[in-house]
Image: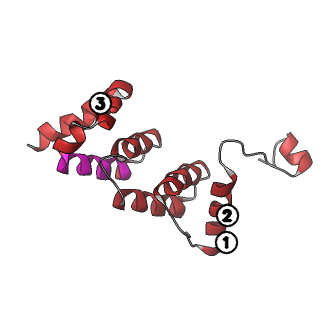
Amino acid sequence: MFRKCTKDKTTGCVDITDIDADTIHRMLLYLYTDTLEDLKWVTASEMYVAADKYQIISLKSKCSTFLTANLTVNNVCEVLILAHKHQDEYLKNAVQDYILRNEKVVFCSSEWKHLMDTHTKLAAETMFLKYCKS
């Protein structure tokens, strides 16, 4: 960011507009201390996105592990989209496994219906796995 002749270089400041201050604070705290304090589902997903953007692999992995361990019928579709968007095959596979283990509840949920409306190919891919594993 500071190598090119840009506003960032001349001011010595970088404006980060797509990540909130709390997430930046937590990310910097992690970089300096290697700890994640008081991690909740929303903060883990926000940190996952930031870690992917800034290629902080260990933080992304920890957030991915947290998200996987805290999957529910209500958030599984959101995590599937997140994994797909960030091309994280490990997280995507874990989410799809959860969906297939809980297929009746997930496939009948309003979240799944919304996923089918907004991410048809991703929903079809996941349902295809069900029939391949049968």
User: Number of marks in the image?
Assistant: 3
Q: CA distance from mark 2 to mark 3?
A: 37 Å
Q: Contact (CB < 8 A) between labels 2 and 1?
A: yes
Mark 2 or mark 3, which has the lower sequence index? 2
Kindly identify which residue carries mark 3. 113
Q: Amino acid at mark 2?
A: Leu
Q: Contact (CB < 8 A) between labels 2 and 3?
A: no
Kindly identify which residue carries mark 2. 28
Q: Secondary structure at mark 3?
A: helix
132 lies left or right of 82:
left
From the top left corner, tell me how far across and down residue 57 is, in percent: 52, 59
Crowding around mark 1 (Cα neighbors within 10 Å: few <14, some 14 to 19, many 20+) is few
Q: Secondary structure at mark 1?
A: helix
Residue 5 seen by the camera: no
Q: Is residue 37 above or below residue 51?
A: below
5 vs 128, nearest the viewer: 128
The colour scheme applied to this rendered structure is secondary structure
